[in-house]
Amino acid sequence: MPFVWMFPASDLGILLLVVALYSEKEDCVNKNDVQCDPQPPSERGSQSNNASEEDWQGDVSRLPVVAVRHLNRMYQLGQTEVHALRDVSLDIYPGEFVAVMGPSGSGKTTFMNIIGCMDRPTSGDYRLTGMPISQLSTNQLADIRNRRIGFIFQSFNLLLRETALANVMLPLMYRGLPERVQRQQAALALQMVGLADRLNHLPTQLSGGQQQRVAIARALVNQPSLLLADEPTGNLDSHTSQEILELLQALNEQGITLIVVTHSGEVASVAKRRVEFKDGLVVQDAYMPAPRMPQAVEKTVRQIAGPRFQQNDDLAEEYKGERRG
Amino acid sequence: MSTGTKARPSRTIAAVQPDWQIQRGLLLKASSKAAIKALMVNGTRSFLTMLGVIIAVAAVIITVTQAEGTSSSINQRFASLGSDILTIQPGAPPNLNGKGGLTFRIGGGDSTLTLTDVTALTTLAHVVQASPILQTNGHTSYQSQNGDFQVTGVSTDYQTIHSLTLTEGSWFSTQDEETGAAKVVLGSVVAQSLFSALNVDPVGQMIRIGGVRFEVVGVLAAADFLFDQSIYTSFKAVQVRLTNTNKASQIEVLVDDVNNLDLVQQEITSLLEQRHRIKNSKDDFWVQSPSQFAQSQQASASSLAALLIGIAAVALTVGGIGIMNIMLVSVTERTREIGIRLATGARPGDIRNQFLIEAVVLSVLGGLIGVFFGLFTGFEIVTNSQLPFILDPGAILLAIGVAGLTGVIFGFYPAMRASQLDPVVALQTV
């Protein structure tokens, strides 16, 4: 009967991995999909034509989550060629909270789409925690989006026919986890964002703030190394905006790398670093000396960080028990 | 699934990782759930889309049911005529390879079959009995009642060859046969039309056939219509009193066992070729066997099948185009949903499968409903025409299978379109 308890055993493996993933950033998405290279990029040399060897020289101990070199993106709009990004080079390190700002058409959304592996640059190199993204296949990009990147959108982008729980289960489903684990993990993520009592509500039955919390839970549920938010408070009133910002800041305090595209000065004021785009160029890149810390952050961090790891351990214990039985 | 290779829980990530890929699979179950949910949300639209397939499948099932009923009824009738009887027909053999049915030739004008042939045939091995048949039509009357019936001159063996039973009276005797006595046995329909109105017992009555007086000695029990509508008398009586010919219009031979039919058929052929002094195989007779009848049945059945396939192909193509149309609309409507799914990690293949499954669910469900609807209607039609109702599981499975295939074929293009959407563009769609 060894086959019978192989299932819980493999589930346990995933859970161990989930826990391990979060504590360790240098990992591969998939051994078979992505070439895993524990060496920092500087020692490996660049394979891009545009990025020269010394471009990758940097702090080896702090491998950037996002490293872009000479990124260009051009669109063909009828007869005219639109240069959305021009030679953008940028490093974003683990634990940073970056506000990407700029007027409409400045290229910040294009930048986000490329960072989020939804779009490919026309030229230039992009490495996500050292992985050369430009060499990945479409399916590998999908897997990267699934496990390494969480998206938060201005218009929430929830599936309107599905419950909050089902929406949060979506990334877990595409990761291929068993449905039972999907449910447990999604419920946990919703509990983290304070929606434990709204699991079976449809998005239409939730307020804007609650919908955005569901979206954040969905973005977090696969323990990504990078959280991308595009105008996360754009559709919310000021009070709710404040709540969401506190939540995002709390997540960042916990160690999640966060990139937020925004127009809003309020959002930018809580970020640790501000990158400003104009006409496809980075015109300003500055660290904020003293980002505003909302009062509630201390409390929220404890609320979130506490159950997060503890619950995962509980779950792992539970599987161990099941395996024995 | 994880097999023996995965084992000890390891602290290193690499050792555990292969599980991820193995676990993922095609997500068919999840995609099926999503597909069914999407179809339920647009209930009316889904049903209308299925209607094309429903009608196509129902039409095929109705036609199959009716065809099966008809062919089974023909087979039953043929069985009642006897499956172990060979019939020797005069003239050149008809072409049985064509798609037409059998032509029954009646009348012995150009017949070369004689009574001595019959006597010779009875000497063959495996031949139990043989009877000459001489048919003519005659205006028949009894007092005020009259009608035109077939008069069949046969030997006394004819009764046993066809296992005919009488409700009253008796079959004419061998002595009557030798003398050509004017004695007849009436088929049940004949007896009814001549005598029931007058409420007279037919046996012992004198009837006129073509002006000649015959005595009724027996009445047949109702059997097949061929027997019911005929008047039977001895071969010689017809020969002498009605037709004035010495040739038989057919000879029927009862074979001892169905398995010997082919053997006896060959024996008869060689015997008669010898007797008729035929060279170059230009026979002036042919032997009709039940298997030949079955062949002609199959020929007509296969032409019907070809027709059915044509109807089904046209109808399912129309239904499939309907499905493709709606799936294209659905992909356009749900572009944002596709964007969300892609952003959360769906591979293009997952999106393709989801929409493909949706199309297949539509068409298979339509096929199932069509089968039930078709069987119900077919049952009504068949029972109303007093044909047997035959359930053909092969046809049903084939109909559902082909409907599913339609879904795959016509769902593929919309599904590919969905899977090739750019996530950025898809998410910008309102």
Image (spheres, rainbow, N blue to C red):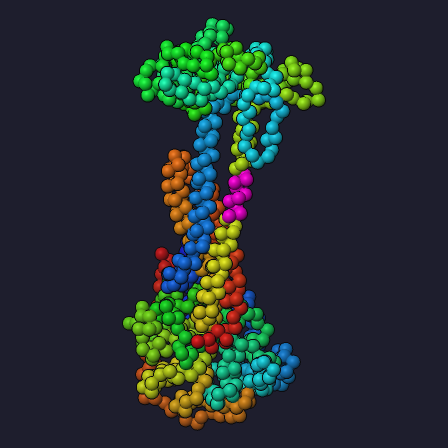
Q: Residue furthest left?
A: A197
Residue, x 53% and y 64% (percent of image)?
A: B416
Task: Report if residue A268 is visible in the image.
Answer: yes
x then y, percent, for residue B342: 48, 70
Q: Residue at x 54, y 26 (%)?
A: B104
Magenta stretch: residue B309 in it?
yes
- Nearer to me, B151 or A271: B151
Residue at (42%, 37%) from the top-left corner?
B390
Query: Which sits in the foreground, A31 or B361?
Result: B361
Q: Is residue B7 visible?
A: no
**Position of B311 relative to B338 (above/below):** above
Quadrant of the rendering where the C terminus of chain A is positioned: bottom left
Q: Which residues are magenta?
A: B302-311
Foreground: A314 or B286?
B286
Name of the residue lying farthest toward the bottom: A289
Residue at x 40% of width, y 50% of height: B369
Q: Report the side of A299 relative to A74 (left or right).
A: left
Image: B311 above or below B239:
below
User: Residue A58, image x and y in percent?
Assistant: 57, 85
Q: Which residue extends farthest right?
A: B280
- Label the magenta part by its dominant secondary structure: helix
The question of residue B294 being in magenta is answered with no
> Closest to the observer: B231 or B195?
B195
Q: Position of residue A138 (x, y in %)?
A: 55, 70
Residue A249 lies, with reference to residue A179, above or below; the image says below
* A52 left or right, relative to B38: right
Counting the numbered discs, the total is 0
* Residue B409: % across, % down: 53, 57
